Every structure is written in structure tokens, then in C-alpha cells.
Amino acid sequence: MAGLLDGVRVLDLGIWRPVPYATQLLAEMGADVLKVEPAGGDPMRVFPQLFAVLNANKRSVVVDLKAPGGADRVLALAAGADAVMEGFRPGVADRLGVGYKAVRAVQPSVVYCSVSGYGATGPMAQVPGHDINYQALSGVLSPRGTKPMAASIPVGDLGAGMTAAMSVVAAVLRARGTGEGEHIDIGIADVLATWTGAVGAIVPRRSPRAMNGMPGYGVYRTADGTLLSLGVLMEDHFWAALCRALGLEGMESVGVVERVQRKEELDALVAGALAAMPAEEALALLEAHDLPVAPILSRSEMLEHEHFRARGTVITEAPGSDVALPALGHPARYAVHPARELGPVPEVDEAAEGSWLAR
């Protein structure tokens, strides 16, 4: 039987989890999803069961975007797509020749969705990160008397993926009716921030166990008692950079399998090095080495953070609205059809049924 999205074609340039999860949702609703994998395949293939869950009902083609002709192959595929979705760090898709402008040149009505850690704009746009960092910055990990712990599932990745799927469906619906495409910019931290803001003073339920099984992934205390989130996972280049930053001599070349086996030992070295320096120094040092690190903010601190204010995730002015400020905006960014600004809050039963039926 045909699905809700039967006839919709989606080109998936994502790896790991957020974009593949978004396109998996679309595939489950009937979209024809073509997954473009890098040379060697999506790194998530090292986890066969998880890869299967995220990529069932898709088709796959391998294209090396760094090789001559790679971008042309992808653009030829994009010319027949309703939507293109990518999860590179901001600017990378453009450098590879498959950014929004290049795709729009071959498919003017395309819906192009970019998913990144902190979004395509704002002071943290180029900062690397993983789920624990996005949770930290958005106020999800705000400590309440005990050491904060990441959720047992990657709520940022999954939340951003679901937001991306929703946004793409809405934009494709518009494009089908008007011929107008869209460029959607989704920051994982933005999505979590809007969730944190929505619950207000309600404390998120904590997982009884940490999700991290890798040294360098978790919450660490600095010399002044401040807690930082560090998100080094499987990437060898992040681990090597962390070792250089913290002076862990001889540890840079330890591979991912050995890191898992020596997790407690290596994590203790990371924790000890960070415990010897104040938070401001540690943040500056880790950021200078392009590592996924973020401070752990409370909801109130998140509302004041310059990145969320620069992104428009935190709204400080809303003329004509009764919503208390600061407030949280829509989790996605639309270049052509921006989300509505905050408006008035309706009174109980203020709209007559006839006005709805007459539309």
C-alpha cells in the first residue's frame, strides 16, 4: 500500500544519527530515500543493528565527494529530488560543492535541510559537539544537587531528527503547491533549548545511569568546582586532540577499541587533568583544540546565552504578544518562509466555529 509520502523523493547526505533518523521517519511514511554514503560507507555501519534501524527501506549509493566528479554525481541525483538533507558542519557542504545554492541551481523548488550541532549562524556555529554538549548548553543537564547525567538515549540527535522530518514535510507540501523551495537550518541545541524552555521549572527526569562508555565523554569537574560536558566519542581525531590539549603523552594513538577496554583508566586521566585547571581555562583550552565541549547551563543561564539569542532561539522582544519574555522560538529556521512571530494568546472559546468552517 502507498504511504503518506508516496512519490516524495529524498536525497540523504547524512551519516551517524540525526539526518538518517529524520530520513528513516520519512521512509517509513512512504518517501523514496536514496542514501549517499561516503567512501567506505556510513561510519554507523560498525553498529549493524543500529544502522539497520536507522536505514531500513532506503536505497544506497557510494559517492566520494572529495574525489573529482563526486559533487557532479550528487547534483545529478539532487535534480530529481524533492528534498535534500545533510548533516555536515556549517559550510562543509558548500565547500564540497553540494550546498544549498549548488543544489537549487539544478532543482529550483528543492527543500534543502541542514542539521548541525549549533545551527548555521551564531557565535557557536563552528563549534564541534555531541549530544551531551547540546544537552549541557540547552539547560537539560542543569545540576540539581547531584552530578548531572546525560539521558540514556541521545535526545538531541533524535529530537533534531524528528524536527527535521516535520519541517521537510511542511516545506515539501508548500513546494508542491507553489513551486517555492526552502532552506531549513536546524541546530540540535536549539531544539533542546526550546524543550527546556517549554518545561520551565519542571525538572527533566534523569537517567539512573550515564550513557557514556568512552573516556572523554561525560561530565567533568574543574578546579573551581564547575562542571563541564565533554563529548569525545569514537572519533580518533578528537581523542588525539584531547590528549594533546591535556598533556596525556603517549595516549594519542590509543584506538577506539582499546579506549573502550581501558575506559576507567583513561577517563581517570582526563578527569584528573581537567580537575587541575579552572573552568574558564579548561574551556578555552579545549575550544582552541576544536574539541566538543560545552558548559553545563541552568535554564536561566541558557536564556541569557549569547548563542541562543543570536540565533533567535531565545526571544527578548515580542510586540503584540502576551507571552512572558524571554521566550523560546520555533526550533527550525526557514530561509524563504520564516516561522510566525509570537502572537497574542487566545481567550477561551474566542473563535467561532463558523470562521473555521468558512475558510
Image: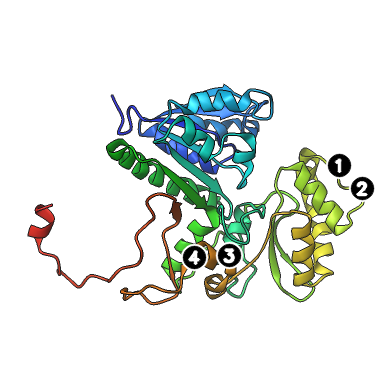
Residue located beneath label 2 in the image: 250
Give the labeled residue for mark 4: 204
Secondary structure of the residue carrying tag 2 is loop
Secondary element at image label 4: loop
Regarding residue 141, the answer to whether it shows in the image is no
Instruction: Estimate the spatial distance between the alpha carbons at disc 3 and disc 4, rounded to whole Å.
Output: 22 Å
**Circle 1 is placed at which residue position?**
253
Of labels 4 and 2, the one closer to you? 2
Q: Amino acid at mark 4?
A: Pro
Numbered disc in front, either 2 or 3? 3
Q: Earlier in the sequence, mark 3 or mark 4?
A: 4
- The crowd level at tag 2 (other Cα within 10 Å; few <14, some 14-19, many 20+) is few
Q: Amino acid at mark 2?
A: Gly
Label 3 sits on residue: 307
How far separated are the C-alphas under marks 1 and 2?
Answer: 7 Å
Residue 155 is situated, as x and y percent measured from the top left of the image, at 52, 53
Q: Nearer the viewer, mark 3 or mark 4?
A: 3
Q: Residue drawn at (38%, 72%), measured in percent from left and top?
A: 318
| Outermost residue, front side | 105
- Spatial separation of the CA atoms under disc 3 and disc 1: 34 Å
